[in-house]
Amino acid sequence: MEENSQSSAESRREAVAKWKAIVAEYQKPNAWRATWQLVNTVGSYAVLWYLMYLSLAVSWWLTIPLCLLAGGILIRIFIIFHDCGHGSFFRSRRANDFWGFITGMLTFTPYYQWRWEHSIHHATTGHLERRGVGDIWTLTVEEYLASSRWKKFSYRLARNPVVLFLLAPLVIFVVLQRIPSKGAKRKERNSVWIMNLAILALAGGLIWIYGFLPWLIIQMTTMGVAGSAGVWLFYVQHQFEDAYWERDEHWDYTSAAMKGSSFYKLPKVLQWFSGNIGFHHIHHLSPRIPNYNLERCHRSDPMFEQVTPTTLFGSLKSLTFRLWDEKAKKLISFRSLRKQKKAVPAPNSSEEGPSGEDDRE
């Protein structure tokens, strides 16, 4: 048994050495690619705001479609912000921090605090003992069944698609990102207050140009589209049936990246708007790879293409997944849980959960 354990450890070391050697080539930032991406993304966003200003004199029927398009561009801006936080967009740390702040202001996200929280997400993806920072609230079947009635209600509410994809994004980006996180250090706390002032200054200038109500409608529509799509992307990247969750003694970084992060295969136009983040398994293997190199890295070796892709329509199934079944090693729906309970009824119990309520879908 000891020999098998040593052999398994050696195999893991060899696998890690192999993918590290492959990704090393794609971790190198390219100043031209990064600059062009800033021009076609931040530049496009600025042009759209100007067009929305001109459209106000014509009709809101023209303004709103422009808002929707601006929301799509804002998703791509967030990916640039995200890469700057990983230090991967430019070679220069100063350039990453500068453009991270600018794109953070456009996306209403404090740069240093987000960078700190997101680093925790990367270090704990798929780790059952380290849930709670930068992830979607996920309970195991056992944890859910042992929960109080109130906790079950809260969990169901948080997992409701209307709350998760329509209300939560605006609450997160407009409200919660304005408040320093618990446990944040001084630099991260200060970044929140500085970003709040920068956003106030930006909003003040736009209100002076557009007027308060037009600015509010444009800003909230744009943020709503970007936030909803962004949360959906993040959800699909880690909430799929055969995802990866393990306890401490079995958790493995490479497995968490390759099995716990999806390959979201999108149509080319959506891949552009989402900044190639669909190649999320590659991103979690190495956050130092800039978004403009993710696809090239994915196609560089057969080991990466072995990851089963999730299609646009296929990803809709993930809406039903709610709980992690540790025995089956997969995410399941509340309906599946009810079927399990019916198949193995508890002594002297009905279909009600431990807290007394019926676990309806």
Image (spheres, grey):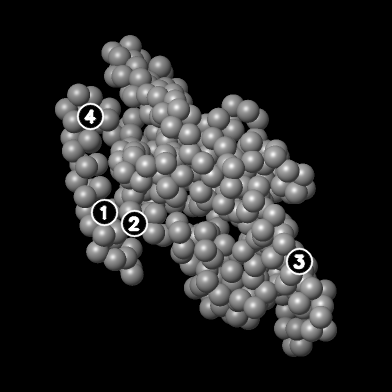
Residue position for label 1: 191
Camera-side mark, 2 or 3? 3
Q: Quadrant of residue 330?
A: bottom right
Q: Residue at x 24, y 64 (%)?
A: 186
Q: Quadrant of the C terminus?
A: bottom right
- Callout 4 crowding tier (Cα within 10 Å): few <14, some 14–19, many ≥20: some
Disc number for residue 206: 4
Asked if marks 2 and 1 touch (Cβ < 8 Å), the reply is: yes
Residue position for label 3: 11
Asked if marks 1 and 3 touch (Cβ < 8 Å), the reply is: no
Q: Give the distance between the C-alpha atoms of the residues marked 4 and 3, in whole angstroms.
A: 57 Å
Q: Residue at x 50, y 60 (%)?
A: 121
Residue position for label 2: 113
The amino acid beneath tag 3 is Ser
Camera-side mark, 4 or 1? 1
The amino acid beneath tag 2 is Gln
Asked if marks 2 and 3 touch (Cβ < 8 Å), the reply is: no
Percent across and percent down for residue 347 are 76, 88
The amino acid beneath tag 1 is Ser
Nearer-N-terminus badge (2/1): 2
